[in-house]
Image (spheres, rainbow, N blue to C red):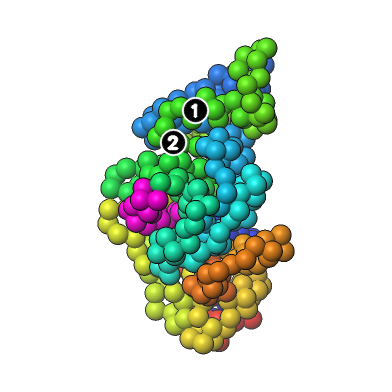
Amino acid sequence: MIIKPFKEPIYVTRPFLPPLNEYADGLKEIWDSKWLTNNGPVLNRFSKELCDYFETENVCLFNNGTLALQIALQGMGISGEVITTPFTFVATTHALTWNKIRPVFVDIEPDYYTIDPEKVEAAITPWTTAILAVHVYGHPCMLDALTDIARRYNIKLIYDAAHAFGTKVGLKSIAHFGDMSMFSFHSTKLFHSIEGGMLIFPETGFKSTFNYLKNFGFKNEVEVVMPGTNAKMNEMQALMGIQVLKYINEIIEKRSKITKMYRDCLKNIPGIILPPPLPAHIENNHAYIPIEVIEKEFGMSRDALYEKLKLYNVFSRRYFFPLICDFACYQGFPVVDPLDVARGVANRILCLPIYDGLDLNDVKMICEIIREFQTGKNLL
């Protein structure tokens, strides 16, 4: 039987949307209060629910994750050099350069694509003030090793946890590691508030600083205590966050079934490599389905597979390619580490569609299309 394209496009992700009537009921509350932004009642309720979810009072909400990270770096007084990964979304590095901080790129480990602690330690100089690590695809970084390095060298450990909402390590949220964690609530994430971001941190004193910085530096009506910006989350965003949070366990459970289907269907295809299953003490949030395409074994390059899937109405993503240090705006930064692992992964990586509404039969068909590309049979 000839495999035909999907009738409707299957994108790499689709946002979860709560029942329209539930969101509409919340909108009525906003219409009645006529309070749209500036720490309204819906935002305060959302903040409280997130405090309960993450079991901490140290939560600060923003209108997006990029500004959250920029403000975190400024509020913590990070300067000089920060060791970070080139295998991430550009916003991670942009947050550094917007704060006049010099990014120092080091390599990643090959299994889960997170920053390599040995390379981190080797890159530390007298100008290093922090490590900015990324929980790539929701996979936790090598937490113990990075914590040890940060303590021994007396530098801050900051996590870009944009992908990691719902990830747990030893029954504890990933938010409770390091000196700061930033989460993105962009609509492409498994948990979202349309747009949005969040900082979680163990040091209570940071909260007032971040609140000043996201609201023009205002302490009260007549006092401005620092040169802040406007990074406040509004009531509509907060309402969406409240509605999505009610379904977060269901969302992750559905995605776990999709992950299992992909693993079962792709495991015996030559040249298709998935990350190893996470250890038992880690609760995966199933944020992404990354595969590596080994051209010699698969018989086709990653880029060729990426293009051919489009012919079948399947839209994957080369996430993250190219490396940050290869973008024009960062090519002027010297890279001492050859980044052999990161370069190899960036040239092989492909993220396949995953979202809670993706039918398991469609997942099977995507895998079958990939298998047929490998064998060269039954294709248009």
353 lies left or right of 360: right
Secondary structure state at the residue bearing disc 2: loop
Amino acid bearing label 2: Phe
Q: Residue furthest front?
A: 126
Above or below, 201 against 99 in this view is above
Q: Is residue 367 magenta?
A: no
Tell me which corner region of the image, top left, top right, bottom left or bottom right, holds residue 70: top right
- Rounded to the nearest whole Å, what is the CA distance between mark 2 and mark 1? 8 Å
Is residue 103 or residue 326 the one in the foreground? 103
Q: Which residue is mark 2?
A: 201
Q: Residues within 10 Å of mark 1 (few under 14, many from 20)?
A: some
33 sits left or right of 60 in the view: right
Question: In the image, residue 96 lies at what x, y percent?
Answer: 60, 49
The answer to whether one can see residue 220 in this image is yes
The vertical placement of 375 against 234, above or below, is below
Residue 191: x %, y % from top left: 50, 43
Task: Tell me the quarter of the image containing the N terminus.
Answer: bottom right
Residue 22: x and y, percent?
54, 30
**Where 338 sits versus 254, above or below?**
below
Residue shown at the point (49%, 30%) measured from the top left: 206
Q: Secondary structure at mark 1?
A: helix
> Residue 2, percent across and down?
58, 80
- The residue lying furthest to the right in this view is 328
Residue 136 is at least partly visible in this image: no
Residue annotated with mark 1 = 207
Residue at 44 percent across and 47 percent down: it is 155
Looking at the rendering, the stretch of residues picked out in magenta corresponds to 135-153
* Tag 2 and tag 1, C-beta contact below 8 Å: yes
Residue pictured at 48% horizontal, 86% vertical: 297
Location of residue 22 with respect to 194 vertically, above or below: above
Provide the major secondary structure of the magenta segment: helix
Which part of the image, by quadrant, shows the C terminus? bottom right
